[in-house]
Image (cartoon, grey):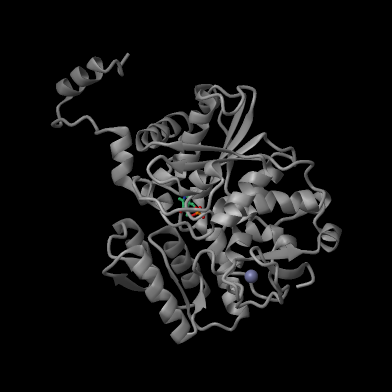
Amino acid sequence: MKNVLCARCIRCGKTYEPTPGLTTCACGGILDIEYDYDFIKQSATKAFFASCQERTMWRYRAFLPIEPQTPLPPLRVGATPLYDVPRLAKAAGIARLWLKDDGLNPTASLKDRASALAVVKAREAGAHTVACSSTGNAASSLAGNAAAAGLPAVIFVPSRAPQGKVAQLLIFGATVISVEGSYEDTFRLSAQAIEEYGWYNRNAAVNPYLMEGKKTVAFEIAEALGWEMPDYVAVSVGDGCTIAGVYKGFYDLHAAGLIERIPRLLSVQAAGCWPIHRALRENAPLRPMEENTLADSIAVGVPRNPDKAMNAIRASHGVTVEVTDEEILAAMRLMGRTCGVFGEPAGVAGTAGVLKAAAQGLIESGASVVSIVTGNGLKDTANGIRAAGEPIRMPPDMRRLRQALQERGVAQ
Ligand SMILES: *Cc1c(COP(=O)(O)O)cnc(C)c1O
Ligand SMILES: [Zn+2]
């Protein structure tokens, strides 16, 4: 990989050869992949992207830590739409708003970007099986991307994992281990098994390549906006890998001379679980917090990648805001009605954060904002109905229909 210099520990600074099986530093710190931007600049030019025909995340392989000969996996990950949504911008009271709908990835979340890269690295490592533990989207995206590439997957989930996501795992043919215990117990069992059987490890914040896949969402946003940056990019935050990846993507583009400035991050956590924001505001070490929110994908009381997330928020001069479950459901409804985009609770939390930050004057009314929809609402229909209400129920009777429509002012 001529574009990669090394992997560096963000805690102690020790550097490593970027081998495909990299995990964490000997000191326990998380590794970060460092690039040779002078080399990347030679091929990753605006002219190259203007003529590039590849319509997946692999369009940006100049910035990705993969060997040139490794075959790319078959699922179409990335190239999700960026919608200009003036009605939602108006409702938020800001000048300009775009939605990046990453719920349209193959397994319906942004996690596909990380899992697709993990599958490539697993192949480079010569792995026979990939594994991870997760409560939701990381698991279903690994299972789907591994299935498409013909790699067996072993997935550990806590027994309370939501059924929709478990259905995805089973359909993709993963070996699903449902652990009677907490997520922490699940994680520990998976780590032991991975060690014992030598499977390829896709656990968040252990594998440094995952974030490199996630950063491709920032490349797509930048390119879709003609390399002109918005003022803010809103992201919902659980473990912290996604927001760190978004920052890394903009950092890469800036270092390669493709954009002039890095947008400010609007970091959004749930009001019932905001350990990263608390640590930032108190300028104190991270303390665990209860997981009190219906947004299951960001209900992370002990984040696994807080340092990279906090570095990213600080470095971008970011803004932090917490949203209640009611605000998440309201944003889900409003996004559906004004944009035709359906996100899962954690998927709309970023937009709920935009609405709240604008209302509180944390971002200016003249601001331009991109909000990333990180997961599809069909993964969690119960909360969708909770947000939107019930249908009009009636027997098959035209008279009753007229009456009901008239009462609601629908039939004019
Ligand atoms: C994983 C996830 C997030 C948060 O990403 P982290 O890396 O855990 O911060 C947000 N939304 C959805 C839908 C997710 O699946
Ligand atoms: Zn270290």
Disc tally is 0
Residue 95: image x %, image y %?
62, 24
Residue 315: image x %, image y %?
68, 46
Relative side of 254 to 372, left or right = right
Residue 316 in view = yes
From the viewer's perspective, is residue 143 above or below residue 399?
below
Relative side of 112 to 158, left or right = right
Rendering quarter of residue 34? bottom right
Split into 4 quadrants, where in the image is the N terminus? bottom right
Relative side of 62 to 317, left or right = right
From the viewer's perspective, is residue 99 above or below residue 21?
above
Split into 4 quadrants, where in the image is the C terminus? top left
Residue 107: image x %, image y %?
46, 58
Relative side of 158 to 350, left or right = left
Viewer-proximal residue, 344 or 27?
Answer: 27
Residue for point 47% across, 82% down:
195
Rendering quarter of residue 41? bottom right
Residue for point 61% across, 45% down:
313
Residue 372 in view = no
Residue 222: image x %, image y %?
69, 44
Residue for point 81% across, 59% down:
37
From the viewer's perspective, is residue 137 above or below residue 4?
above
Residue for point 42% across, 80% down:
192
Viewer-proximal residue, 34 or 76?
Answer: 34
